[in-house]
Amino acid sequence: MTRKKVKLAFIVNDTARKASYNKRKMGFLKKVEELSILCGIDACAIVYGPYEPQPDIWPSPLGVQNVVFKFRSMTELEHNKKKFNQEDYLKQRVSKARDQLMKLKRANMENEMKLFMYKSLQENEIMFQNLSMEELNVLFWLIDQNLKDIGVRILEASQIISAPSPGQLQMAPPPQLAAPTTTRMDH
C-alpha cells in the first residue's frame, strides 16, 4: 500500500508536530544504522531537537567521538575529495546541459547539411553563396565522410566478389599415413 504524498509545510499543531518529529527522528536514526551496517562504514548522527535538552546521539557518545576524530584527522584534500554541495551540483547540471545542447546543435547542423546536400544532388544545383563558413565546413566534412563510407563499401563489395565461392574451395588432400609395419617375432 503506497502512502500519499506528504505536503511539506510547517505543522501548526504542536502535538502533531512533536509526534511527527519523534517518528521521523527515529526513522532517520534507523536509516543511519542501516547505512552503517549495509555499507560497512563508520557513521554517526547527532540530532538536536526543540523538545529535549540533550541531543539524540547514534550509536553512542564514544562512537560519535571516534567518527568525528577520524573525520578531523583527515587532510583537507580528503575532506573535499567527494564533497558535493548544491553549487557544485548546479554547475555540473549546467555543464551537462551545455554539452548536450552543443551535441544537439551539431547534430542539427549535420542534418541540415545532409538535407541541403541531398536536395542539391536532386536538383543538380548547388547554392554555396547562401551558406556560412561554418555550414560550408560541415558540408565539406559530410561529403568527405560520405566518400569514405562509399570507399569502405566498395572495398567490402570487391572483397566479397573476389572471395571464392564455397563450391570453388579446394581442400588439401588428406595427409598420407604410413602403412603400419609389423614385425614377426618367432619364438
Image (cartoon, rainbow, N blue to C red):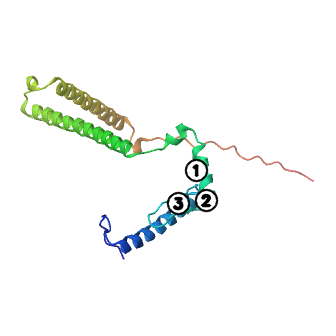
Q: Is residue 49 left or right of residue 114?
A: right
Q: Is residue 57 above or below residue 168?
A: below
**Of pointers 2 and 3, the one earlier in the residue sequence:** 3
Q: Residues within 10 Å of mark 1 (few under 14, many from 20)?
A: some
Alpha-carbon neighbours of circle 3 within 10 Å: few (<14), some, or many (≥20)? some
Q: Is residue 91 above or below residue 19?
A: above
Q: CA distance from mark 1 to mark 3?
A: 17 Å
The residue most toward the bottom is 1
Mark nearer the viewer, 2 or 3: 2
Camera-side residue: 169 or 6?
Answer: 6
Assign a secondary structure to mark 1: helix
Q: Disc count in the image?
A: 3
Crowding near the residue tagged with mark 2, few <14, some 14–19, many ≥20 C-alpha atoms within 10 Å: few
Counting from the top left corner in percent of width and height, residue 4 is at 31, 72
Give the answer, above or below, for where 32 lies relative to 164.
Answer: below
The image shows residue 7 at horizontal and vertical percentages of 29, 66
Q: Which residue is mark 2?
A: 61
From the viewer's perspective, is 24 left or right of 95?
Answer: right
For marks 1 and 2, the one nearer the N-term is 2
Residue kind at label 2, given as amino acid type: Pro
- Residue highlighted by disc 3: 35
28 or 47, nearer to the observer = 47
* Upstream in sequence: badge 1 or badge 3: 3
Q: Which amino acid, by three-letter code, is at mark 1?
A: Val
- Counting from the top left corner in percent of width and height, residue 67 is at 59, 52
100 left or right, relative to 52: left
Q: Residue at x 27, y 30 (%)?
A: 145
Q: Are marks 2 and 3 in contact (CB under 8 Å)?
A: no
Q: Which residue is mark 1?
A: 68
Q: Quick check: 56 left or right of 15?
A: right
